[in-house]
Structure formats: structure tokens, C-alpha cells
Amino acid sequence: MTPGGDGSWSLERHLVFTLGAVLGGLWLMAAAATVVLIQPKINEVFDSSLQETAQRLLPLAVHDLQEVADGDHDKDDGGESLSKEFDDSDAHLVYQVRDAMGNVLLRSHDAPAAGFPVALRRGFSNDGGLRIYTETSRSERIFVQVADREERRALAVREVLALLALPFLALIVASVVAVKVLLRNATRPLLKLREDLLNRGEANLSPLPPGRLPTELRPIVEAINRLMARLERLLQSERAFAANSAHELRTPLAAARAQTQLLVDDLKERREGARALNILGLLDRLSRLVEKLLQLSRAEAGVGMSGKCKPQEVVRIIVDGYGSRLYNAVGPVQLTIDPHADSHVAIDQDALGIILHNLIDNALAHGTAGEPVHIAIGSDATISIVNRGPVISPDHMPKLRERFSRGETDVEGSGLGLSIVDTIMRQAGGRMDLYSPARGRADGFEVVLMFRPAT
């Protein structure tokens, strides 16, 4: 098991590795047990071969020695020759024919000239890595000793293990593959559950479908559903409180502003008029903050999650509104639309209106005075909003998405505009990218909105 850089690890890889190691260990244990069990059997087979060979050679040796004693070296009576019998079938063995005094009378070509240093009595003996069997004639004057090397027996054991290794290894590989396939099939519901969670929007707290889940996963899904239900209730309560509070503040703020405006008109010729004018400015700022809080409440409630629209139509309406409000400015907002931009995107038009108002207000407030704000709509319905102005430091750029975070500026604001835009875009499945300096420029600030195509 190899954990990732964040401490995560794969259950499937861990199980496959563990089971593979267990199977390998079991194979080694089986191999060791095979050696322990098969060694005595192999020794029995080889000992039996030694004994049978010695018993077969004894009468041949007696026959050959008798011919030598009779002087019939050229006599061919149809009997078997000791050397022919042995060389034809038992070349891996060596033998010696000895008399009662231990003298070597006959021997195979690769047997030592000196007699084997073991006792001349029937049975098995070991010496110098040799396994020797001695067979005696009835008169106990002729002894046949047949030997083979113990390393040959060890080689036979290794050959058996080699023959067993291939099927064992094939079995291990097949077992690991089978385990991997079975685990993948078994964890498929879990992977589907993970995909369902990853594909959900941030505001989607609806219960997870139970589906055909195994018994072990059902309690997890039920616990997640209970947790999401509690979160949904808490979020609804929080949204309702924020929305109701902001909405309820609208009326008293409007009334206070109206009264303050009357007070400014009455006191404009007096010294207290400046104070009244400051109060009016504070009320206007508080009204804008309340409006932002209402927008934030709508954004968190998922205003952009449903619906579709054509961005170019909504942008034209918003830009025309700014043109009528800022008629005394020279080209406050310049709009460029790609002629091939005619697609629908997955966002509600009211949500897109909130986004555009916030971005254009920010661009006009923080951009260089007298410089227009440029809005461009690409063929893929991507919207770019650019304003001139000083470059924002890279360290401060990520903070602009946070609530109540403002750039290094003295311009009044709530620090909620980009946070509202970012929230709505993520809920709609889109993305907001920020650039400073603006792309293709040495200064300025650019916001690029990329939407999910409508289905």
C-alpha cells in the first residue's frame, strides 16, 4: 500500500497487494511443505533403484568372474555381459565388484579404482556425498556395490519444484487478476455513489438515491442523507434570516433616506447641512450593502442552478441600462459580440443579470476614470469584462473571491461582488477566471465567465 501525497490510499490496490502477498506466502509454504514431503519419497525411489540395480548386476558379475576364472574370454554363450547391461541403462550410477578382502575385481569406467570406504555387508551406506548399496553373493565372497551422488537427488527435488513453480505462479497471477476483477465489481456501487456526490452542485443537498447498494453501504448512505437533511434545514434557516433581515431593512432605510434628504434640503444653507449630507451618504452605502446581501442570499439559495438564456441578449439589456444611467460619460461601457454567438447557456437570466451588474459596477468603480469598460462575448458564449487600472498583486488575487475581501483600493465597496459572482457561476456549473494585468495588456483587470452549454 503506497499512500498518496495527501495521505490517501486505494482500498482496491491495498486489497490486491495484500491478497497477492498472502497467496505468494502460501505458495512458499506449500513449496516448503512439498520439499519436506517429497524428499523421503524421492530417496525411497532412488534407494529402490540402487537396490534393484545391485541385485541385477550381482549374477552378471559372478558370471563374468567365472568366465575369467575358466579362461573362456572369447566364449559367447548368449549370456548377458555385466558392462553391456550396466552401460545401457544405468550410466548415471557407478559400481564396483569386490572380493571378501575388499579388492576391486570389476568396476564401471567412472568408478574410483580404490574400493568404496564402507563396510562389505548388505545394506545402504553414505560416504563423501555418495549413497551406496551393497549386495552380497550367497557365498559372501563376491560383493557388488552400486552408488549414486546425493546431489542428484537434490537436483531431482529442484526439478520437481521447478515443474510445480510454473502452475503455482500462473495460479497466483490468475488469483490476483480474479481478485482485482471481483473487487472492481464489488466496489462499483461505491464508485457510482462517489460520482453522484462529485457531480452534485454545492447547493444540491437532496437525498442520495439508495439504488442497488450492498448492505454494508446502506448505513453510510442513510447517515449522509440525514446529515444533508440537517444541513439543508440549517442553510434554509440561515438564508431565510439573511433574506428577511435584508428585506425588512429596505423599508426603514428608504424612509430614513427620504427623511434625511428632506433634512439636507432644509439645512443646505446652514452649517449642519454638511452633517446631514454625510448621513445621507452613509444611508446610501448601507442600502447598497443590503442589496448585496440580498443578492448573496439569492446566490446561496441556488438562483443560477436552473434555467437557460442567451448571454448576448441579457448583456445588451444590461449595457443599455448603463448607457442611459451614465449618459454624460464618454462610452462608459463598450460591447463587442462575436457574430457567431447564438448559443444558450445553462444559467437563469436573472442570475446572469446579477452577475453582470456586480462585475460592471466593480469595473466602473475600480477602473481608471474616463476609461471605458470593455465587454466581449465570444462565439462559445464566453463573456470577458475588462477595465483599465493598476495591476493587482498575484498574492492578493485568490482573496478577491472571498466575502468582504477588497483589493488595495480606497474606493468604497462591500467586498461581496466577486464572491456573489463566483457562487452563482459554480452553482450553474460554470467558472470565473480572474486576470491582472488583463490578457494582452500591461495593466488593468479582466474577468472571464465560462458557462456550461444548455441541454
Image (spheres, rainbow, N blue to C red):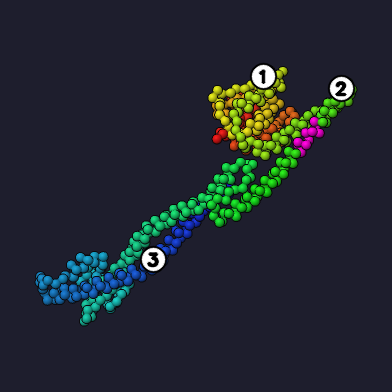
Instruction: Name the N-terminal-most of marks 3 and 1.
Output: 3
User: Can residue 366 be seen here?
Assistant: no
Q: Residue at x 51, y 50 (%)?
A: 188
Query: Quarter of the image holding residue 128?
Result: bottom left
Amino acid type at image mark 1: Gly
Instruction: Name the N-terminal-most of marks 2 and 1.
Output: 2
Image depth: mark 2 or mark 3 in front: 2
Kindly identify which residue carries mark 2. Answer: 268
Q: Closest to the observer: 136 or 338?
A: 338
Residue furthest to the right: 270
| SS at mark 1 in the image | loop
The local crowd at label 1, few if under 14, some if 14 to 19, many if 20 or more residues have their Cα within 10 Å, is some
Q: Residue at x 39, y 65 (%)?
A: 34
> Residue 314 appears at what percent x and percent y?
63, 27
Instruction: Name the N-terminal-most of marks 2 and 3.
Output: 3
Q: Which residues are magenta?
A: 245-254
Q: CA gap, disc 2 to disc 1?
A: 34 Å
Kindly identify which residue carries mark 3. Answer: 35
Q: CA gap, disc 3 to disc 1?
A: 94 Å
Image depth: mark 3 or mark 1 in front: 1
Kindly identify which residue carries mark 1. Answer: 331
Q: CA gap, disc 2 to disc 3?
A: 111 Å
398 on left or right of 252: left
165 on left or right of 419: left
Amino acid type at image mark 3: Val
Q: Residue at x 80, y 28 (%)?
A: 281
Residue 252 painted magenta: yes
Residue 250 painted magenta: yes
Quadrant holding the C terminus: top right
Query: Quarter of the image holding residue 104?
Result: bottom left
